[in-house]
Amino acid sequence: MSETGMAGETDDQGGGPMSLSRRRVLQLGLAALPAVCGARLVSGALSGSDGDAVRAAGADAPAATYDPTAHSWAFAIDTTTCIGCGRCVEACKLENNVPDEGKMNRTWVELHILDQDGSVHVSSPEGGRQGFPTEETLPAAAAATVRDAYFVPRTCMQCENPPCTWVCPVSATYRTEDGIVLVDENRCIGCGYCMVACPYGARYMVPAGGATPKGVAGVVDKCTFCYHRITRGQQPACAEVCPANARIFGDLNDAASPVSVALGEKRVRVMKPALGTKPHVFYTGLEGEVD
Amino acid sequence: MTRLRAALARRRPRSRAGVVRWILAGGALVAVLAVAFVALALVVPWVYGEYGFHPTENARTWAALTPRYADATLCQRCHGTEYAAWVGERHATVTCESCHGPLAEHAATAPREASAGSLGLAKPSVGLCALCHEQSPAKPTAFAQVDLAEHYAGAPCLGCHDSHSADAVRPPDISHSLARLPACVTCHAPAGLKPVPAGHVESSDAICQGCHKRPTAGQ
Amino acid sequence: MSVQVAGRTLTTDPRVALRAIRLEVAGTPRPLKLWFALLTALCLVGAVGAVIALPPGWEVLGTTPTFEWGILITGYVFFAVTTSGLCLASSLGTVFGIEMFIPLEKRHAILALLSLVTAFGLIALDLHYPIRMVFGAVLSPSPFSPMWWMGVFYGAYLVFLITEVWSMFTGHWQVHRIACVLSSITAVLAPTTLGAVFGVLAARPYWHGAFTPPAMVTAAALSGIALLGIVFYLVHRFRLAGWERAATLAIPAIRLLLTITLMVTVLVLAWQMMFGLYGVVPGLSDATGALLIGPLALGFWVFRVVLGLAVPLVLVLLPRTRTPAGLFAASGLAFVGLFADRMIFVSAGQIAPGTAVAGVVSSPWAAYGPTFVEISIIVGAFAFFALVYTLAERYLPMGEHEGHLVGAFLGSSKPAATTHPEAPDPIPPAAPLLDPAGGAL
């Protein structure tokens, strides 16, 4: 049998145990290229879109005038004034197209009840979106044994050393220069590693079939400090609607901003400082048992 | 060592052409993969710059989303009366959208009348007021809160309170709460004082008697 | 038109192939036909579950923001450590040339390749965008991410395993030697990266720590050796290719490895529990409590400790049960116990109420229950593994090969005894300690 030729219709070219002709190899190779490119298109298609497509850019898009290196955004949350009305949770859901499910929140409010015997009860019905009806969360009968109770608004901490960005295998989540940790919905593979890595439980997986923040399901989403608002000089939606001045937002680089003033006046602490994450959300009025 | 050599010799001999074919096949596969990855690298945006090391373009898309909540100064342009009643009063920390929902689209749509349907909330309900004002041990004691079962139970909040200034204009502006005063308030609340019925007897409730020496005619 | 594979000629003419398949199916013995039918049915069930799980974002899994890694991740971890353990165990024969481990050489490679392919299939079903993972890992790599390194090492391991299997069946012994060495090295490194995926998370005290990677290697060894014990008992029982040396050498060898690994695992587990209970470390003591007396206690004590460690240890140590059947029982129980162990490991890291999560306060425990889709995928994965391995055992030459005549990489240069793959061994088993009945060590 011919050792070197490929002419002729017979495909038995001899040679090694799996003999393939050069022509067959080229055929396979050429077939593979569109398959490989098709895979990209398929993955793009699989990134999907439901009724909520990506919202168009607003008329006053930040683009040219916003300098991310000049800002360092942060929150100062005062738990001594929070009344647990849940307007912040509602505003966040509406502003950012967050899914309706009660357990999928970018921000949420917890009710902490400390008993006389030292035990702590934490509840967060639907993230606090419908408030905390007293008879369900802290009925009068139980109030007798309560030493202290207060509300704690929670959100992504936008850490300076975020464990979530370190562990992402495809570099889909990242921290911008103005301090906000964002998720690239085109790169995220939905492995959930950042979700288990976050010590504060700030992330959730976007389900299909309902509202989605950017029209993509199966990726991870989290609070972005309303990046589209703060780059236009507005406040995050939760801070905008808070009736109790519990959420004070601002720029740490600006000494006159509300958050800098608040940090100067109050004793603040962060959650889980021992993990070294350096959060950008500072709390006033927490008792020791909170995280 | 001879057994080793024998074993090596027993392997099926490979022709040079066969080896060349395998190398070409491998090279073709590697070339195809390289072309594919290069093409994809060109397609995937790979911009670094003002937003830092990681995806710049993606940060820009997050910043380009459209806000849905506006702020109170925007509402003032059309709703001056409500704004005037609201600003500086006790509800001044409650922005318009805290009760009325996201209004940026409503404010931006012309004509305004057509966009009225986009209002999230036209008239707040007892449920909405209760979110903030229902009494709870977890709320700060200085915060205005009432026990709904005892504070004019069943009455609409807006029957007495103006929603924007939070003032209770009726009944008369007195300095004390009318809660937990059943003897007087059974007849004199919540819709306003009723006309004095015939045969009305002075209430023996000492608390009421502290100020109301004589039953007063309805307003 | 035909293709030569492993010394056989396979036709690619569809009609001829179909007729050959029909004849083959008719010629299969009845118990084997039932076995194939059962496995195929379970594979179909798994396929249905897999198709349902494919669209990204469909909430068909039982995972929640509190408990994102469920039974699919457990299945992936299980098959990934099994594949590493298989090469770890067999490296004693293929790399170090120790005589009593030589019979493991061919079967371990097939099992390892199958196990790795199954693992990749399971992770592809859990990831919402698996295709993006392949491109993302190359175009936007993250060397700080243990999961990226895990992908690199298991990907390399896949390449080495494919090379090992291919060179084994086509007689390229030099390539085979090198591939065995490379896959043995990767078989140690890859499970450490898998352990690091869990171990670097300071947010999860149960997983956190430098010991998690070596503990994962221990689990890998146990799982791989247990699987080899199951397979080689079946080789002995059904008189499959190379069964005489399998019975006399492999089974005692596997029993030796199993005994050692079980003892090491018992020590590791005992210290893990004691560290978890020492003091009251938030998150860690909660999780350990969940294991010992909480929601995971049933699975832990029954499946992990008693069935997975205690009974197998008794079976391999007692003289009365040091038989091939005893090894089969011990290996089977250890294998099941290790799946339970990985499930408990993945659960314990997430179950403790470290914090409220996005509106769902995990108090007192985070809840997770596998859905039908997840269970069907896991069942389908095991069925696929068993089905393909049975086919391989039936249609591929699985006896010992000539490769070790080339001399193991690090072992002695003396060629081993067997000259023909299928013939009985003319030279009696080497070590005088070995009992032909598979007895005392």
Image (spheres, coloured by chain):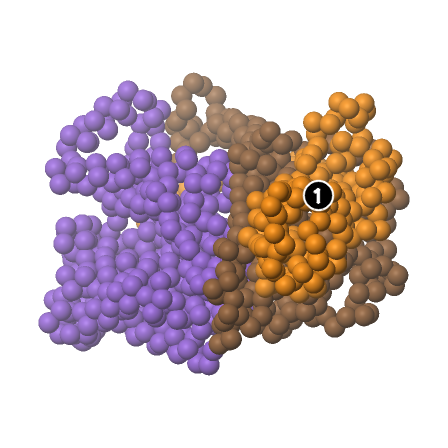
Could you tell me which secondary element the residue under label 1 belongs to?
A: loop
Residue C21 in percent (x, y) is at: 24, 28
Is C322 above or below relative to C24?
A: below
Q: Is residue C302 above or below residue A66?
A: below
Where is residue C141 shown, x and y percent of the image? 63, 51
Image position of C88 (left or right of B102): left
Residue marked by disc 1 = B218
Residue at x 63%, y 32% (from the top left corner): A52
Q: Can residue C156 be seen in the rendering of this structure?
A: no
Q: Find residue C397 and report its horizontal and vertical position in percent.
A: 26, 46
- Judged from this view, the residue extending furthest toward the top is A9
Q: Is residue B143 left or right of residue C38?
A: right
Hey, which quadrant is residue A290 in on the image?
bottom right
Residue in the picture at 42% in, 55% down: C367
Q: Nearer the viewer, residue C44 or C71?
A: C71
Instruction: Please provide percent x and percent y for residue C89.
Output: 34, 64
Instruction: Name the residue at 34% across, 46% down.
Output: C375
Most distant residue in the front direction: B199
Identify residue type, mark 1.
Gly
Q: Quadrant of residue C134?
A: top right
Q: Is residue A202 left or right of residue B66?
A: left
Chain B: give its colour. Answer: orange
Q: Is residue B82 left or right of residue B181?
A: right
Colour brown, chain: A
